[in-house]
Image (cartoon, grey):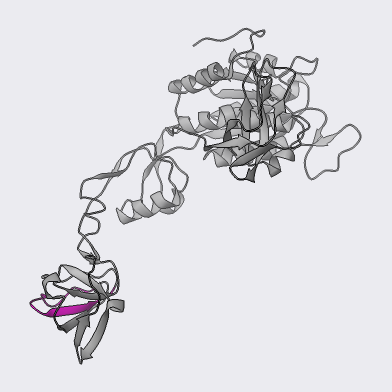
């Protein structure tokens, strides 16, 4: 696996490839969990059906089960069939059974006529008043055949998947173990959110933000708090995080200032840095390293940079560790107003909002410290490196967040 010199500013696609390819060296394993704890987990084996679904021909609505050949005739009601009960009789000429939605269609019947298209003619007799009818029968096995693979390995289990697993009797699915992710915020200027910042201080917003993003990526976050800008503080906290996690995320301290110590501490702890700079704005001083014990992302300290680099690099990485092929939700919209910029050496990611009529507009955005701009954003658009202007009316890809 290649690693790049400190001076090399790597293209984003190359950085993403390096990050994703590194996973092959280490995965967190699998485990069985109760179905009620399986939401948002990644399935680690194919699940096949142990039965036909529906398991019998069932009525799609409340009505009368009868023979299509008898629709022009007066029909005698021979029984009522509630859902969950076995029919007692076979339907023969000019007979019908009153039937409820989901109930077993009796032998001999080949359609169910809706109650709304019938009228009583006398006790226990009805007549079809419509001109024609659909069968209104859900056929045995029309949804799923016995033995058919229904949910495949690598699926991220949504509420819909949970319902399907329950219908298949898969109450302890095999899923990927969730990666454990240690989060360290660095910087003498930081105080915890419950504290009132003093002069020259700011609250630590990165760690709670990253913990939420990790949870959204189906992994497990541990917040180790704030490390001071000293080698001793960084080294001690990093060692603890490495020992307890599969992945460590450090925010801040990754640039080239006198107090940016993260690179050196990572190397001291036997991390091989595969890149130290990417051609993305915000997010240029992003670091990625691999050791025998863990992976580590060093993300920039400004909160928008932290947010964006996590979404672009860390989220797909964590999900792939569990065997899930993450694909962001992308829509294509027309740009409402022209966007221009002067510096074009990096991909620029800008927050945008949907404005209606299939259009999208950039948000008032003051740079990588302006985290509240993202609260109003529906997504991000990328202005590629080398592009100085995107004109009004241009079709742009919106990566939803």
Instruction: Give the answer, above or below, for where 178 lies relative to 120.
Output: above
In the rendered image, the residue lying farthest to the right is: 199
Instruction: Give the answer, above or below, for where 103 lies relative to 373.
Output: below
Residue 114 seen = yes
User: What type of secondary structure mainly makes up the magenta span?
Assistant: loop
Residue drawn at (44%, 32%), measured in percent from left and top? 325
In the rendered image, the residue lying farthest to the left is: 93
Magenta highlight on residue 93: yes
All told, the count of numbered labels is 0
- Residue 232, image x and y in percent? 74, 21
- The C terminus is located in which quarter? top right
Q: Is residue 179 left or right of residue 288?
A: left
- Residue 122, image x and y in percent? 20, 92
Instruction: Give the answer, above or below, for where 37 lies relative to 373.
Output: below
Identify the image quadrant of residue 257.
Answer: top right
In the rendered image, the residue lying farthest to the bottom is: 123
- Residue 92, image x and y in percent? 8, 76
Q: Is residue 151 left or right of residue 391?
A: left
- Residue 150, image x and y in percent? 30, 45
Residue drawn at (73%, 22%), measured in percent from left and top? 341
Residue drawn at (21%, 65%), measured in percent from left and top? 135
Magenta highlight on residue 196: no
> What range of the chain is rendered magenta?
85-100
Instruction: Give the answer, above or below, for where 293 lies relative to 372.
Output: above
Q: Is residue 312 left or right of residue 226?
A: left
State the residue in front, 213 or 227.
213
Q: Is residue 123 left or right of residue 116?
A: left
Identify the image quadrant of residue 54.
Answer: bottom left
Residue 292 seen = no
Identify the image quadrant of residue 70.
Answer: bottom left
């Amino acid at each position: 696996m290649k690693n790049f010199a400190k001076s090399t500013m790597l293209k984003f696609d190359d950085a993403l490839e390096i990050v994703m390819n590194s996973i092959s060296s280490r995965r967190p394993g699998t485990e069985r969990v109760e179905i009620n704890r399986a939401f948002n987990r990644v399935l680690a084996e194919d699940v096949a059906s142990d039965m036909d679904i529906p398991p019998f021909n069932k009525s799609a609505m409340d009505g009368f089960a009868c023979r299509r050949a008898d629709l022009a005739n007066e029909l005698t009601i021979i029984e009522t069939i509630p859902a969950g009960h076995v029919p007692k009789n076979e339907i023969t000429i000019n007979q019908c059974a009153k039937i409820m939605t989901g109930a077993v269609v009796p032998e001999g019947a080949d359609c169910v006529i809706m109650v709304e298209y019938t009228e009583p003619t006398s006790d226990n007799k009805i007549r079809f008043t419509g001109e024609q009818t659909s069968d209104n029968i859900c056929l045995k096995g029309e949804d799923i055949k016995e033995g058919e693979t229904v949910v495949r390995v690598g699926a991220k289990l949504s509420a819909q998947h949970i319902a399907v697993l329950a219908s298949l009797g898969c109450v302890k699915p095999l899923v990927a173990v969730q990666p454990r992710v240690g989060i360290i915020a660095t910087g003498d200027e930081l105080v915890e959110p419950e504290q009132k910042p003093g002069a020259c201080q700011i609250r630590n917003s990165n760690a709670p933000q990253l913990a939420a993003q990790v949870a959204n990526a189906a992994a497990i976050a541990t917040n180790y708090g704030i490390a001071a800008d000293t080698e001793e503080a960084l080294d001690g906290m990093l060692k603890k995080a490495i020992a307890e996690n599969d992945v460590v995320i450090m925010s801040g301290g990754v640039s080239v200032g006198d107090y940016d110590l993260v690179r050196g501490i990572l190397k001291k702890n036997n991390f091989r840095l595969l890149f130290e700079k990417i051609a993305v704005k915000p997010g240029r001083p992003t670091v990625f390293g691999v050791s025998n014990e863990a992976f580590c992302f060093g993300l920039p300290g400004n909160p928008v940079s932290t947010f964006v680099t996590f979404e672009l690099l860390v989220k797909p990485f964590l999900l792939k560790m569990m065997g899930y092929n993450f694909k962001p939700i992308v829509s294509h919209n027309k740009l409402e107003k022209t966007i221009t910029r002067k510096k074009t050496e990096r991909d620029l990611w800008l927050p945008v909002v949907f404005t209606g009529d299939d259009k999208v507009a950039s948000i008032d955005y003051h740079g990588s410290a302006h985290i509240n701009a993202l609260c109003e954003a529906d997504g991000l658009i990328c202005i590629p490196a080398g592009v100085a202007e995107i004109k009004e009316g241009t079709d742009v890809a919106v990566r939803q967040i």
